[in-house]
Structures are given as structure tokens and as C-alpha cells.
Image: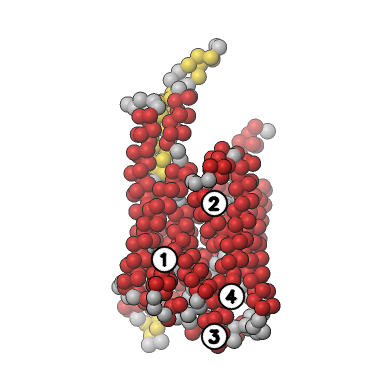
């Protein structure tokens, strides 16, 4: 990786892209510290220090702490993620949208992107109103708002929606003119911005007010070793692939002979990457946001909607009890499995791959072309997807499992999955750009 970075900075075009990406990342981090207008920052800091629970810890992690600071980027890119989920799901039931997703080409992608952005703004508006009502209802005694009223509320909601729109634009610019997928890079930066606080926590475990703690040192070593093993496991699963051999028959066209070579189809063990985890997380937290928008004190109540809220937000046993945590973990696991299958088969169609192999005169050794090939690829994909989905599920619910031991980890499995996945994807894109640059130089 370090060799790749060294070579990248030696290449003018790639270096320009990297510096452009870093510039936009700096702008994103500056925006995380710009509080929306009409907020008393002193009262907000008091609220943050005294509050025992938050509306959504995941959003705060992804936004790099912007949510707890009530900054213009408080909602981060979560409305865009939710909009992407909705568009993908609608593509399964609306034929015209399905055609755009599968056969639209560049024009179709542009239209889907337009629809996603429009839906993002709608969802951002709903979420911004929910956040404002939540703060104004639950924390009105803290005096967070300088001049409470309709004008202040409208200004705050508009600022939050504008912040999400700006993040969408930043992500798009990183994708087009920088390095990596812009949305993923923004999420990645938001997560790793919490690393200094993790280091501080580990330091405080070892050096307490009473002095050096041997127990704290052993716990810290356990956390560090566990994190290294976890990262290694994530890298192994992300890079692992099943190579299906394919042979192409020789054919003569004019005086030239084509085909006759052996190749393979690389099937990733975790083809969906971290997308299912992000989708499932957004899906789980969205009901709580909607419920709290209508009832800011729902956490202290009982009844059907209070149960749904507690179930949606119970990411550790310290919040609403072990029962809610177990139910949350089970549904979260099933959602990750479901989204893993959905996203994998949305991006890889065994029937389409089988037809392409047959058209080009290829075949899988020992398997007849056509339907048997489709069934063979589907069988392999189902097994790989099941293992990949279970792996993602276990890693994602790891903080919940750890909470049963009394140890709550803020920087958990979901964060590591996203960070490692985005880092690998970005490095691969960097390497591909370097290879492309070398090819261009050779041709010239």
C-alpha cells in the first residue's frame, strides 16, 4: 500500500486527484464543526456531556461527531443511503425503474442518480424536522435554541438539508475528480475521526487517577490484539474469491484463429462489501427517528410505539435492557443477510453471465452450457453469499455481543468493516489508475 502511495505521488495526474480529495476532506471536517444558526453552543456542550443516550450513535460515528455538535453536517450522508435503498427496492416492483437500473446505460444511471438526489432531499427534510422537534421537545430545558420559534426552526431545518446536499456534492466531486467512491470516502473519514478518542480511552484505562493499572493494561492489550485479528479477518474475507474456470473453444474467422484460451470468473466471498451493513443500519434507525419526531419523550413511555422505538435503538444492554438488545441483534442479523443476498444478485446475474459465456463459445469444464451453467453458478453464489452474509452479521453485532460482558465499544465491528472495505476499494482504484497511466505512456 505504501509503495502504491509513493508511486501515486510521483504521477502528476494521480497526485492532483489525491490532493483534490484531501482538500474536500478538509472542507468536510471543517463543516463538522460549524454549528447551525440559532444554537447556543454552551448549552449544547452541556447537553452533550450530560446526555446518557443519543438519537443514533451510528449517525454520530458516520458523521464524525457532527450529529452531537448539531453542525450543518449533523445528518451526514444517511438520507442519501436511505434514498439509495428505496430506489433499489422500488426497482424490483416498478418495471420502468428496473429497466433503467439494468439496461439504461449511462443515460439510465444519470436518471437514477437524479431520482436518488430528489428523494434524498425529501428524506433529509423529514429527518431534519425530526431532529429539530426531538431537540426542541426533549432538551428545551437546556436552552439549546437561542430564540425558539418557527423562524429559528425553519432556519435550522434548512441548514441541515443544505448540509446534506453539500455533502452529496462533495461526494460526487470526489468520485469524478478525486480518488475512490466519494460517499464511501466521506463515511470513512467520519469514522476514523473518532480514533483519537479511542486512543484516549485506552490510555485512560492504563493510566487511571490512582496510577498505573495492570488490569487496564491487559484489557487494552486484549482490545488492540482483538482489533488487529478482526481487521486481518475482514481483509481476508474481502479479498477472498472463488475462481470458476472457463474454457473457450477455438474458432477460425477468415485467416485468424480466435479463442482457445483458459480463464476464470472471480466470485468474491463478500461481493456486496459493506453495503448490506450500511443499508441494515439505516433501516434499523429510521423507525426510531420517525417515532421521535412525533413524540420526543417516547423513550420514557410504555406502549406499542415505545416498544418499537426501544427495539430500534437498543444497540447495547445499557440502553433498554437485555431483551431489546437480543431482539435488535436478531433482526439486524437477518436484515444484513437479506440485503447481502439482494445486493449480490442485483449486481451479479448468473443467467446473464451464463448466456454471455455461451455466446462467446465458452463453457465451464464438466458443466453443460445454458441452464446447467446458470444453476451451477447460482449454487456457488448462494453458498458464498451465505458465508459472506453471516461473516458481516457477526462482525456487525460484535459490539452488542460485547455489551453482554459489560464492555461497550463505540468503535465496533460495523466501523471496522466500513473502514477496511473503503480503504481496500480506494487502494485498488489507485492501483488501477497507476496501471492505466503506465499503459497510456507506453502507447504514446
Q: CA distance from mark 2 to mark 3?
A: 40 Å
The residue where tag 4 is placed is 132
Residue drawn 46% across the image and 61% down it = 283
Q: Give the mark nearer the N terminus: 2 vs 3.
A: 3
Q: Which mark is residue 87?
A: 2
Which of labels 2 and 3 is toward the front? 2
- Residue 97 higher or lower than 359, as above or below: below
The residue labelled by disc 3 is 46
Contact, CB < 8 Å: mark 4 with mark 1?
A: no
x 61%, y 36%: residue = 439
Image quadrant assignment for residue 375? top left
User: Residue pushed farthest front?
Assistant: 304
C-alpha gap between disc 4 and disc 2: 26 Å
How far is disc 3 from disc 1 in space, using C-alphas?
26 Å
| SS state under label 3 | helix
Query: What is the crowding at mark 1: few (fewer than 14 residues within 10 Å), some, or many (at least 20)?
Result: some
Amino acid at each position: 500500500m505504501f509503495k502504491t502511495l509513493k508511486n501515486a505521488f510521483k504521477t502528476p495526474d494521480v497526485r492532483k486527484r489525491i490532493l483534490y480529495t484531501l482538500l474536500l476532506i478538509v472542507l468536510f471536517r471543517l463543516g463538522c464543526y460549524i454549528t447551525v444558526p440559532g444554537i447556543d453552543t454552551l448549552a449544547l456542550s452541556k447537553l452533550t456531556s450530560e446526555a446518557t443516550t443519543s438519537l443514533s450513535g451510528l449517525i454520530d460515528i458516520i458523521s464524525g461527531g457532527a450529529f452531537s455538535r448539531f453542525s450543518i453536517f449533523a445528518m451526514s450522508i444517511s438520507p442519501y443511503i436511505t434514498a439509495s435503498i428505496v430506489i433499489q427496492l422500488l426497482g424490483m416492483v416498478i418495471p420502468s425503474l428496473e429497466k433503467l437500473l439494468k439496461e439504461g446505460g449511462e443515460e439510465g444511471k444519470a436518471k437514477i442518480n437524479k431520482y436518488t438526489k430528489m428523494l434524498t432531499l425529501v428524506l433529509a427534510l423529514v429527518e431534519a424536522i425530526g431532529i429539530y422537534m426531538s431537540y426542541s421537545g426533549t432538551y428545551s430545558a437546556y436552552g439549546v435554541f437561542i430564540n425558539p420559534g418557527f423562524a429559528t426552526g425553519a432556519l435550522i431545518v434548512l441548514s441541515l438539508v443544505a448540509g446534506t446536499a453539500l455533502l452529496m456534492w462533495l461526494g460526487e466531486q470526489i468520485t469524478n475528480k478525486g480518488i475512490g467512491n466519494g460517499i464511501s470516502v466521506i463515511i470513512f473519514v467520519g469514522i476514523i475521526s473518532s480514533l483519537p478518542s479511542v486512543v484516549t480511552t485506552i490510555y485512560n484505562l492504563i493510566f487511571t487517577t490512582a496510577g498505573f493499572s495492570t488490569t487496564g493494561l491487559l484489557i487494552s492489550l486484549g482490545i488492540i490484539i482483538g482489533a488487529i485479528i478482526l481487521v486481518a479477518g475482514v481483509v481476508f474475507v474481502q479479498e477472498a474469491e472463488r475462481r470458476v474456470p472457463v474454457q473457450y473453444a477455438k474458432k477460425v474467422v477468415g485467416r485468424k484463429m480466435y479463442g482457445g484460451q483458459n480463464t476464470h470468473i472471480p466470485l468474491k466471498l463478500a461481493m456486496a462489501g459493506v453495503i448490506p451493513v450500511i443499508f441494515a443500519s439505516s433501516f434499523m434507525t429510521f423507525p426510531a427517528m420517525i417515532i421521535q419526531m412525533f413524540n420526543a419523550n417516547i423513550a420514557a413511555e410504555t406502549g406499542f410505539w415505545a416498544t418499537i422505538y426501544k427495539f430500534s435503538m437498543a444497540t447495547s444492554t445499557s440502553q433498554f435492557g437485555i431483551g431489546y438488545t437480543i431482539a435488535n441483534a436478531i433482526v439486524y442479523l437477518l436484515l444484513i443477510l437479506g440485503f447481502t443476498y439482494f445486493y449480490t444478485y442485483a449486481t451479479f446475474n448468473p443467467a446473464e453471465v451464463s448466456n454471455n459465456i455461451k455466446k462467446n463459445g465458452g463453457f465451464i469444464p464438466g458443466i453443460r452450457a445454458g441452464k446447467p451453467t446458470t444453476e451451477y453458478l447460482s449454487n456457488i453464489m448462494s453458498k458464498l453469499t451465505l458465508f459472506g452474509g453471516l461473516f458481516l452479521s457477526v462482525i456487525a453485532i460484535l459490539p452488542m455481543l460485547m455489551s453482554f460482558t459489560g464492555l461497550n465499544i463505540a468503535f465496533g465491528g460495523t466501523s471496522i468493516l466500513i473502514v477496511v472495505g473503503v480503504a481496500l476499494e480506494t487502494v485498488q482504484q489507485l492501483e488501477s489508475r497507476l496501471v492505466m497511466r503506465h499503459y497510456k505512456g507506453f502507447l504514446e
